Amino acid sequence: MKLLELKGVSKSYGALKVTDDLTFSLDKGEALGIIGPNGAGKTTLFNLVTGNVRPDAGTVLFNGRDVTRLSASVRCHMGIGRSYQVPHPFGGMTVLENVLVGATFGAGHSERAGTPLAMAALERTGLLAKANRLAGSLPLLDRKRLELARALATEPDLLLLDEIAGGLTEHEVAELIESIQEIRADGTSIIWIEHIVHALIAVVDRLLVINFGSLLTQGEPAAVMASPEVQEIYLGIAVE
C-alpha cells in the first residue's frame, strides 16, 4: 500500500525552478534513498512533503489523503516526522526536554503521556544516559542522535532524514546506520537524503536520483549507482 505519493509536484522561486514535475511514491515499510548534486532540490522536496513549503503545482498524498494544502504541524500529527541537516537543539534545555518537545508539540501528547515516549526515543538512539545533560553541550554525533530522537518522539509513520550522517567519522556513521536499521525494522518507513552513498545502500531498498529538481532515475541501489548517467551527473565521472 502506498504511504506517500507525489504527483507532478513543482516549485519555483522566481525564475528558479527547484522542483520540476516530480512524481514518485513510497510503499509502507519501504526505505528510499535520495541522492543528487548540491542544488538539485532535495531539501526543498522534504519541505514539500512536510508542509514547510507549498507547491506551485501538483499533489502530495499521505496514506491516501490529499495533504497538499495542510500545514506542517497537521502533517506531523498525521505521522510525518523529520530530522534536519544541521542540528539546532534548544541548547539551554536538557536532552530529555528537547525530545519532550517532539512528543508534546509534534505528537500532541501531554507532558505526562509524552515522557515515556521521549524516554523510549532516547533509549533507541543511545542517549538515555545523557537525558539530563544540556543539549548545547553535546558533541556532533550526539546532536545528530538528538535530531533523530526528537523526530522519533513525534511517532512518525514516515521518517525523513536530511543528511544525518554528514560530518561524522566512519565509526560514527556505522553506529548511525545501525540505529536507522533498527528503526526501519520496527516498521517505520524512511526517506533518507544523503551524500554518503554507502550508508544509504546499507539501509534502503531503492535509490532515487534528482537533478535540477527533476527525477533522473530510480531503482535498485547498485543498478542506479552503476548507471553512466548517474556517474557523470552525480559523481562527475565521464563514462564513454
Image: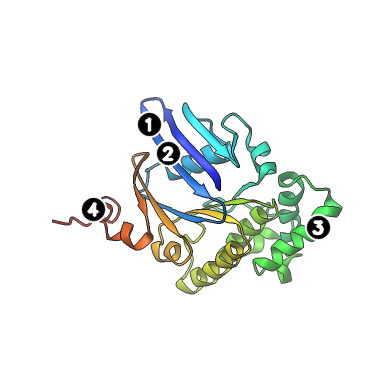
Q: Secondary structure at mark 3?
A: helix
- Toward the left, the furthest residue is 240
> Where does residue 232 sit, x and y in percent of width and height?
23, 53
- Between disc 3 and disc 2, the foreground one is 2
- Between disc 2 and disc 4, the foreground one is 2
Q: CA distance from mark 3 to mark 2?
A: 38 Å
Which amino acid does the dot numbered 1 rest on? Lys
What's the residue at 81%, 57% (across, down)?
115
Q: CA distance from mark 1 to mark 4?
A: 22 Å
The residue singled out by tag 4 in the image is 232
The residue singled out by tag 1 in the image is 17
Marks 4 and 3 in Cβ contact (< 8 Å): no
The residue singled out by tag 3 in the image is 115
> Where does residue 137 sit, x and y in percent of width and height?
65, 63
Q: CA distance from mark 4 to mark 3?
A: 48 Å
Q: Earlier in the sequence, mark 1 or mark 4?
A: 1
Mark number for residue 23?
Answer: 2
Which amino acid does the dot numbered 3 rest on? Thr
- Between disc 2 and disc 1, the foreground one is 2
Marks 2 and 4 in Cβ contact (< 8 Å): no
Q: Which of 93 and 47 lies nearest the eye of the viewer?
A: 47
Q: Tag 1: Cα neighbours inside 10 Å, few (<14), some, or many (≥20)?
A: some
Q: Secondary structure at mark 2?
A: strand
Q: Earlier in the sequence, mark 4 or mark 3?
A: 3
